[in-house]
């Protein structure tokens, strides 16, 4: 069992109050770590360290910041076996997924922003011949970075990398459910030679440690990824304090399949979109809308493919779905399966805890991938975020209806649509209320593009230039130019 430490001012330290809570491996139910139950005092120390470090780091040449962050990326890559195992144990996700997606992406995040800052440019506006305006972009100070449990290192590094690359210092808080890789990251930061206090990591509960970061007057920037209700709570605190806020929140994403789609691609990809990471990715397609003429055969095929997925020990090869994050979350997801039945839905497969997986996992929290049909778009099952391996499939009659059904939730994070008709692809993509629309693909990500949600999926955008803008303060410097006709030559001009 590991004892997790806070990372403050370059040191791995115990929480000031000395309190810890247990970190559970959801695949086995075993305690896999002791997590600091940090409070205001720990956050105070972390913010103070970040403030002290800001003076030096914010004026460190971009090339040097780049060098340190690239070294960190290399160290993450070199440590992939350990990091992937820690991520799998902490979240219940298949080890193979952590190894192929989560950890490589964390290294890529650092590389991307480390090198992006070498290529930034700034704007200049000339006001006729009278003045020259130059936009300066400066780091904003201490950034508060709060992340969820589903993609722990992937999402935490997605915030840390742009914050630090642009010269901010940071206080980060990983989810209380998944602290292991953040702890390892702290050790790697020391090895990479990141100066003391540039990154501080405080572990603990959201209402305590997280809220203390959001409420701290010396943290002017808050980047949060997590649930919509938490995002709203953070906004209520941070808004009146005039903090800059990015809120990446929940989703209830549609997958729209038109009859002319290439089903050899659309079918396996929509199954993957529904159940990757046990359906615990904010971008998972949890509502599949299918044109009526192909609906029956599509459902049959989708169900057949779903039944073939292996729910298994996350550490074993061949596991498609591992454990859900916690017993409480399993209860929540199961309550939605019950709700789907109450609302008149038919569970076509899954909906149960699988038979014993192996001895190691006998106390784990697993759920079979679940497909529900027979519900309308307006019911709660189809409007509320479940965030588990539960997907609904509904028929639609025409393009207009597909768009209306897709937009019929309070969320607007991502959508994917499948058609061979590119013109229709364009038109539907324009009408979808969604921060990202994938046409004939899913989860294809370019780190340069804006990422974020519409409606209650969030405020602000991450990714590429958007992140660089978010973490920097634009300042216009207006320089009046002298009038050439009245300018007197100085002695030195001649
Ligand atoms: P959550 O909102 O419960 O917690 C997220 C983080 O916020 C955790 O670190 C938690 O400790 C912290 N927190 C909780 N209360 C807080 C408070 N009052 N003040 C400050 N911090 C607080 O979310 P979760 O259950 O960890 O994650 C699942 C949710 O995250 C889902 O809704 C999912 O859709 C969403 N998510 C969104 C994206 C995205 O990019 N839009 C990505 C991944 C996950």
Image (cartoon, rainbow, N blue to C red):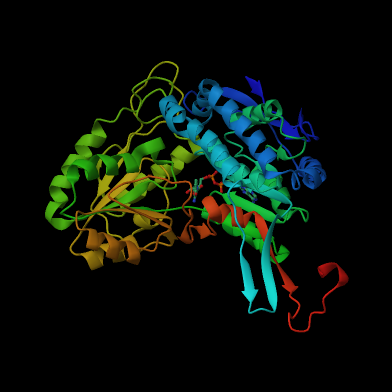
Q: Is residue 93 visible?
A: no
Image point 20% across, 36% down: which residue? 304
Pick whichever, 481 or 105, lies toward us: 481
Vertical position of residue 253 compared to residue 277: above or below: below
**Location of residue 111 by image quarter:** top right
Q: Position of residue 1 (x, y in %)?
A: 62, 19
The answer to whether 335 appears left or right of 172 in the picture is left
Residue drawn 39% across the image and 19% down it: 316
Determine the image quadrant of residue 321. Answer: top left
Question: Which residue sits at x=44%, y=25%?
Answer: 95
Residue at 40 percent of width and 22 percent of height: 313
| Occupied quadrant, residue 377 | bottom left
x, y percent for residue 281: 43, 43
Please say if 461 is above or below 494.
above
Residue 423: x percent and y percent? 23, 63
Q: On the picture, is 211 further left or further right than 181?
A: right
Picture layout, residue 169 above or below residue 423: above
Q: Quadrant of the C terminus?
A: bottom right
The residue nearer to you, when weighing 10 against 77, is: 77
Looking at the image, residue 60 sits to the left or right of residue 446; the answer is: right
């Amino acid at each position: 069992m590991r004892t997790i430490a806070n990372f403050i001012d370059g040191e791995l330290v115990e929480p000031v109050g000395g309190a810890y809570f247990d970190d559970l491996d959801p695949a086995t139910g075993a305690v896999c770590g002791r997590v600091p139950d940090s409070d205001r005092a720990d956050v105070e120390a972390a913010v103070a360290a970040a403030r002290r470090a800001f003076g030096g780091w914010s004026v460190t040449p971009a090339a040097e910041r780049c060098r340190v962050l690239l070294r960190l990326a290399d160290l993450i890559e070199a440590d992939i076996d350990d990091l992937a195992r820690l991520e799998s144990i902490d979240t219940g996700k298949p080890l193979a997924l952590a190894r192929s997606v989560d950890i490589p992406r964390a290294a890529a995040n650092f590389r991307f922003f480390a090198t992006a800052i070498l290529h930034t440019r700034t704007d200049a506006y000339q006001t006729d011949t009278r003045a020259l305006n130059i936009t300066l972009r400066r780091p904003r100070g201490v950034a508060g970075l709060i992340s969820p449990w589903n993609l722990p290192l992937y999402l935490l590094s997605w915030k840390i990398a742009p914050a630090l690359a642009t010269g901010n210092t940071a206080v980060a808080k990983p989810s209380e459910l998944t602290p292991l890789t953040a702890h390892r990251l702290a050790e790697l930061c020391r090895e990479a030679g990141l100066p003391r206090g540039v990154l501080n990591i405080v572990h603990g509960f959201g209402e305590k440690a997280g809220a203390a970061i959001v409420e701290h007057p010396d943290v002017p920037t808050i980047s949060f990824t997590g649930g919509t209700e938490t995002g709203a709570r953070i906004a209520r605190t941070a808004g009146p304090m005039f903090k800059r806020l990015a809120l990446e929140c929940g989703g209830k994403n549609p997958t729209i399949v038109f009859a002319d789609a290439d089903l050899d691609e659309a079918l396996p990809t929509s199954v993957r979109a529904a159940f990757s990471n046990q359906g615990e990715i904010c971008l998972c397609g949890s509502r599949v809308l299918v044109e009526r003429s192909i609906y029956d055969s599509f459902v049959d095929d989708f169900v057949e493919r779903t039944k073939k997925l292996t729910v298994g020990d996350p550490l074993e090869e061949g596991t498609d779905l591992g454990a859900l994050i916690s017993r409480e979350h399993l209860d929540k997801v199961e309550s939605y399966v019950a709700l789907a039945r109450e609302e008149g839905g038919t569970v076509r497969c899954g909906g149960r805890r699988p038979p014993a997986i192996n001895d190691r996992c006998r106390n784990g929290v697993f759920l079979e991938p679940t497909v529900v049909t027979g519900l309308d778009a307006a019911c709660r099952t189809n409007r509320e975020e479940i965030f588990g391996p539960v997907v609904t499939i509904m028929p639609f009659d025409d393009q207009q209806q597909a768009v209306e059904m897709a937009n019929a939730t309070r969320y607007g994070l991502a959508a994917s649509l499948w058609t061979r008709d590119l013109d229709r692809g364009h038109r539907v993509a324009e009408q979808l209320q969604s921060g990202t629309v994938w046409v004939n693909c899913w989860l294809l990500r370019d780190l340069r593009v804006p990422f974020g949600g519409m409606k209650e999926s969030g405020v602000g955008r991450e990714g590429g230039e958007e992140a660089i803008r978010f973490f920097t303060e634009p300042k216009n410097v207006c320089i009046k130019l002298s009038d050439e006709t009245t300018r007197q030559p100085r002695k030195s001009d001649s």
